[in-house]
Image (spheres, rainbow, N blue to C red):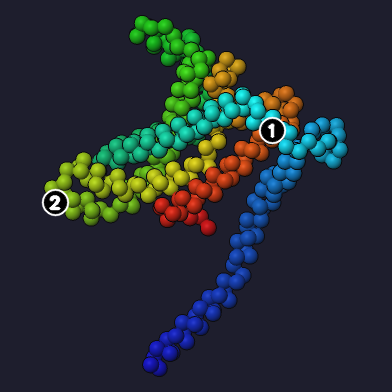
Amino acid sequence: MEANLSEQAKDSTVRRSKRKKGRGQPWILHFMVLPAAVMVFIFSYIPMSGIVMAFQDYKPALGFAESPWVGLKHFQYMWENDYFLKITGNTLFFACTKIIMNLIVPFVFALLLNEVRKMALKRSIQTLVYLPHFLSWVTLSGILIDMLAQTGLINQFIVYLLGTKPIFFLGDGNWFRFTVIVSDVWKEFGFNTIIFLAALSGINPALYEAAEVDGATRWKQTLHITMPSLVPITIVIATLALGNVLNANFDQIFNLYSPLIYQQGDIIDTFVYREGLLSGQFSFATAVNLFKSVISLILIAVSYRLAYRFAGYRIF
């Protein structure tokens, strides 16, 4: 009994000493984060005061203080605008399709790459598919525009080897959608593959050894061990991607689209850019972007809740 009491006293003393030592450490860490926090405050939070434009008939010459208030007029016009509903549908189509394909393709590719036994070959393939992630869409769009032009490399291959007419990839709405989705998956699936490969490296090798002893083939091992082990990280990635349902990648669309395919290729972000900066409809563009931001915030909160509930994932 006395030994237990002495051990408890020692433990409490150690805990108190650790608390005393740790009191000054968070301040040091907070001080290190301070420059980044200041930058975020200046460039992210202060500009949020411009949200007031969504409820005004904003005139740059009058400023925020003297521009007349119109209440929810711009939001009402937004919902009565058929074209806004069209671009919302385009945004959801692009975003949802990209989310699905950027889950399926890296998942399958990670399974295939995991079967490669030569490490040099495996690392070379992984590096090659990972490189496009580092290229900006400004660079890639220039390459795609040249390759997919009427006289580009891809159409020359189609005409001379397949004997068909050239395809107007960036001028036909349906082909534009196909091009956007395929190019986005090609650019990002290498990066997403790394996440699945990291999850694969955490699988206990004893499970495969036990399966081999039981006579399981490589396919059965993949089906009953590898794939179920990837389900939690797949759920996390899918649920966290819900916050980007209204983000269809402005950089990609803006650098590839043209007035020819506005009906099939225009999204909320490009519409806001044209209405706000090119047409000078600052208040209406702000209202549209505010609507998108509020919905995205709700989806992010829901996605984190779902990730914690189904996969036990949480940030804070």
Q: Residue 223 vs residue 152: left or right?
A: left
Residue 300, how many percent across, how many down? Answer: 54, 46
Mark 1 or mark 2: which comes first in sequence?
1
Q: Residue at x 74, y 44 (%)?
A: 49
Locate the N terminus by quadrant. Answer: bottom left
Side (left or right) of 101 relative to 295:
left
For marks 1 and 2, give the one nearer the viewer: 1
Does 72 sit left or right of 225 as displayed?
A: right
Q: Residues within 10 Å of mark 1 (few under 14, many from 20)?
A: few
Q: Percent x, y for residue 97?
A: 45, 31
Q: Amino acid at mark 1?
A: Gln
Query: Where's residue 189, x and y in %?
Result: 42, 35
Q: Under tag 1, what secondary structure?
A: helix
State the residue at coordinates (33%, 52%). Answer: 202
Tell me the tag on residue 214.
Answer: 2
Label 1, on which residue?
76
